[in-house]
Amino acid sequence: MTPRGRSALDTAQARADGAADTKSASLATIMVVEDAPEFQELVVLTLTLEPHLKVGFIASSGEEALDALDRVAPDLVLLDFRLPGIDGLETARRMKKQRPDVKIALVTAYTEEVLKRAAHDAHVEAVIPKADFSLTRILDVLRSAPSA
């Protein structure tokens, strides 16, 4: 990531952090798990457009996200499918074991039906193709009932 890009990400995170110091009923905390810096930045900048969303944590691997899950207590995890180490599906399975109430949206460049079925079996609430990533899709997932 370029210094300018990092600055934009830092600015967006600072705005998100400043939105509220404490978690309230009207503020949803989002964990972003994405290893590609450019898409990570896009996701964070998109989330800061919605005043009711707070980026609670940014991870580059499934292991890093799992380590922070209880501490961050996100309402929604935006989880990349292809990650270094354990992949997004396995990360989702472990997250649901650790915190069954957390909502997870698998964000991926892959849209094969096999992946959608596997995501459903892992109790993932949504599969969002990266090409269709939008704030509207995120808000729809937040409004949905958690998968059991």
Image (cartoon, helix red, strand yellow):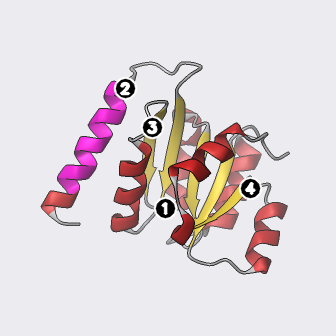
- Mark-to-mark CA distance, 4 and 3: 23 Å
- Is the N terminus in the top left, top right, bottom left or bottom right quadrant? bottom left
**Among the two numbered marks 4 and 3 on one chain, the one whose residue lies closer to the N terminus:** 3
Residue for badge 1: 61
The one of 91 and 36 positioned closer to us in this rendering: 36
- Mark-to-mark CA distance, 4 and 1: 17 Å
Report the magenta stretch's main SS: helix
- Name the amino acid type tagged 3: Glu
Segment colored magenta: 6-19
Instruction: Kindly check if marks 2 and 3 are in contact, taking CB atoms under 8 A apart as contact.
Output: no
**Among the two numbered marks 1 and 3 on one chain, the one whose residue lies closer to the N terminus:** 3
The mark tally for this picture is: 4
- Name the amino acid type tagged 1: Ser
Residue for badge 2: 19
The location of residue 102, given as percent across then percent down, is 69, 41
The location of residue 88, given as percent across then percent down, is 62, 65
